[in-house]
Amino acid sequence: MNTFDPRLLDLAQEFRESLRLGVYMFRRLDPEGELTAAQLSLLSMISDGGLRVGDIAKNLGIKVPSATEQIIKLERAGLVTRQPDPDDSRAVQVAITQAGTAAVESANQRRNAMVAELLQDLSSEEIEHLASALPVIAKLNSSFQN
């Protein structure tokens, strides 16, 4: 097992807790919206191209049957389509529709406005700190995904 500097372990704990609370905040952000946070995550995930159901489940941290249930709901709403995977005839890819893209854009605009309202209450220095932390968070996200 790796031995880490205790400061890194403390920072890791604080970072994980902050992310966990942030996820809760974003899930509650837009209760009136037509898309749940999970549905919006799923649609955003496939907005650059289709993904297999198993990959969607893995990325969302849920089991395949739960992902399939969400996909069926989105398909019935006309927001996604399921089609054969071009690389594997046994697999299915889920792709976003034009209506799905429009729904994501609408939800993102509404949610960005809500977050911007929260950010208004920060000082200029706090906004600068947040802005400078984002590339570091993006780097961590990228290294985790690869």
Image: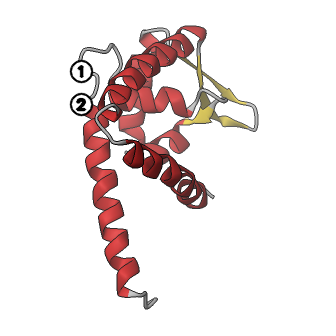
Whole-percent x and y of residue 126? Answer: 38, 48
Nearer-the-camera pick, 129 or 82: 129
- Residue sitting at x 28%, y 22%: 30
Q: Residue furthest front?
A: 124
- Residue sitting at x 50%, y 46%: 131
Q: Residue furthest right?
A: 87
Whole-percent x and y of residue 5? Answer: 41, 87
Q: Looking at the rendering, in which quadrant would you find the N terminus?
A: bottom left
How far is mark 1 from mark 2, CA to CA? 6 Å
| Mark 1: secondary structure | loop
Nearer-the-camera pick, 59 or 121: 121
Colouring method of the image = secondary structure
Pointer 1 with pointer 2, Cβ within 8 A: yes
> What is the number of the mark on residue 31?
1
- The amino acid pointed to by label 2 is Arg
- The amino acid pointed to by label 1 is Pro
Query: How many marks can you see?
Result: 2
In the displayed structure, 62 sits above or below 109; it is: below
- Residue sitting at x 44%, y 25%: 71
Q: Which residue is mark 2?
A: 28
In the displayed structure, 12 sits above or below 127; it is: below
